[in-house]
Amino acid sequence: MATAKVKIAARLRPRLTGEAQDDAVRVCHSEPAECSNTSNNGNASRSSSDGSFTGIAVANPHDASQVFRFPFTSCYDADATQAAIFEADVRPLVDVAWGGVTVTIFAYGVTSSGKTHTMQGTPADPGVIPRVVKALFAKSASPTLPGTTERAEIAVSYIEIYKDDVYDLLVTRENAPKLPVRENGAGTVFVAGLTSAPIESVEAFERVYATATARRSVGVTLLNRASSRSHAVLTLTMHVTTTTGNGGQTVREGKLNLVDLAGSENNKLTGNDPSRMAESSAINKSLSVLGQVVHALNTGASHIPYRNAKLTRILQDALGGSSVGLLICNLAPSAKFRGDTLNTLNFAVRTKNIENRPVVNER
């Protein structure tokens, strides 16, 4: 396959009760007047030939007459549905993974920006993960190519990275040791001793997923009553055997890594107690290393610091490796978060320049 850059989708969450009604962060859809008085923000500003702009506009916190513009082809305002995001940006990647490629989808953003809602959702309004699983089983019921039969084996693994230690969420915490991250002779990074559970239906996945998600580390902060205190990586592995009319067979192995990153935190806003501050420090450190990896890839550095955090080590294949990537930037609308929002958007601009070299795993 040809090289593929990491795609960016930006999503602005709805205002919460009590949040100020300001226009600090806006979604623009090719409307010049909507994002007037703009100023360049390094490589983060661009307009089309007719002067229109599609992307995210953020008011300069130091000069209200200026607006920073961040151009992304996929932008979702507060009214966007989970279904719209899935159909436009995620479903095409399900097809890619089914074809034998590793796909990684990240949810990234400041704490309380809606990452977990985007990835998990609710039973009434499911997010990326349950929709992906439903799409996979729908594909397994109908062959991709006419005149062929397909047999799919789907398995799930689920980890959390808590204070830079890796735990298996498919086993109880009492029985869950810290798992080592290793690399095999082929250069593939893996988590040693990780459970991989076969799943045969959407309902079977839902049972496993609900139990495992309940084990994830969460805590109360001033910004979020159920703040994720860890990074979570759910991996779906598909072995798809295709049989042609003359009896020939091919086997493709695809993977979908679905990543709910813990949010960067400003302890002045979260009101964290000492134990929460220790968690916050670990979260911020791993996200800082993620930023360092992205910067090193963008500048062509001879050394990429993947090994400086378990998070970047595990996600190494998605950052300059053989995976197809989608970064969903979750944005909070309030001026209170504007500095963090700008950091998120600048990270996204750097990330979209990363080139991966996807490989089809077929035999």
Image (cartoon, rainbow, N blue to C red):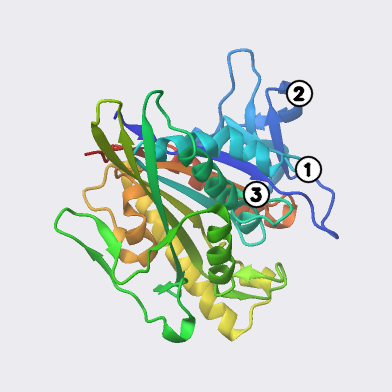
Label disc, if present, on residue 154 of the rendered structure? none
The amino acid type of the residue labelled 2 equals Ala
**In the image, residue 182 lies at what x, y percent?**
24, 66
Q: Decide if residue 230 is on the left or right side of residue 56.
A: left
The amino acid type of the residue labelled 1 equals Asp
In the depicted structure, whether residue 335 falls above or below residue 41: below
Q: Decide if residue 235 is on the left or right side of residue 64.
A: left
The amino acid type of the residue labelled 3 equals Leu
Q: Return the residue at label 3.
A: 331
> What secondary structure is marked by label 1?
loop
Q: Return the residue at label 2.
A: 33
In the depicted structure, whether residue 143 falls above or below residue 112: above
Badge 1 local density, few (<14 within 10 Å), some, or many (20+)?
few
Q: Quadrant of residue 75?
A: top right
CB under 8 Å between callouts 1 and 2? no
Instruction: Tell me if I can see residue 292 in this picture.
Output: yes
**In the image, residue 258 lies at what x, y percent?**
48, 53
Q: Residue furthest top?
A: 50
Number of the front mark, 2 or 3: 3
Quarter of the figure with the N terminus: top left
CB under 8 Å between callouts 1 and 3? no
Q: CA distance from mark 1 to mark 3?
A: 13 Å
Near-viewer residue (237 or 354):
237
Q: CA distance from mark 2 to mark 3?
A: 22 Å
Near-viewer residue (47 or 320):
320
Quarter of the figure with the C terminus: top left
> What secondary structure is marked by label 3?
strand
**In the image, residue 23 lies at what x, y percent?**
78, 43
